[in-house]
Amino acid sequence: MTIQPRSRQRGISFLGLIFVGGVLAITGVIAAQVFPTFVEYQAIEKAAQKASQGNTVIEVRKIFERAVEIDAITSIGAKDLEITKEDERIVVKFAYQREIHLAGPAYLTLKYSGRSK
């Protein structure tokens, strides 16, 4: 009579499951806070592109201000734009940063910059 070896169980332990769940939860919370800043960045990029169709600096700022009001942009204003002329085209550049509070003294700093095409 031979004794069969006991088969080893495979899979994740309860503590491993708790750890993986915690990491996924923290990642989800951070992603949920970062996503709106990315959507706002895309709105700012679209507004800068639209504003670059103006002919003067004042007109460019007014077009951008209207887009800020429509899209509820809070991170940057028309006065923060850098407006230049390259090859007879108006180019609108912008740069700003957002901070997301994580816990205690820890912050996640996101730096955004862009320009019209």
Image (cartoon, rainbow, N blue to C red):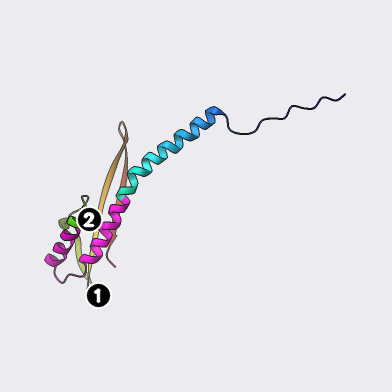
Using the numbered discs, state the Cα–Cα distance from disc 2 to disc 1 in whole angstroms.
Answer: 30 Å
Residue 113 position (above or below residue 4): below
Residue type pointed to by label 1: Asp
Q: Secondary structure at mark 2?
A: helix
Answer left or right for 78 relative to 29.
left
Q: Is-magenta flag for residue 80?
A: no
Residue type pointed to by label 2: Asp
* Residue at the (37%, 39%) spot, across then down: 29
Residue 69 percent coordinates (x, y) = 17, 55
Q: Secondary structure at mark 1?
A: loop
**Which corner quadrant of the image does residue 3 belong to?**
top right
Residue 85 percent coordinates (x, y) = 21, 70
Identify the residue under disc 2. 71
Answer left or right for 113 relative to 61.
right
Residue 74 position (above or below residue 57): above
Residue 60 percent coordinates (x, y) = 16, 65
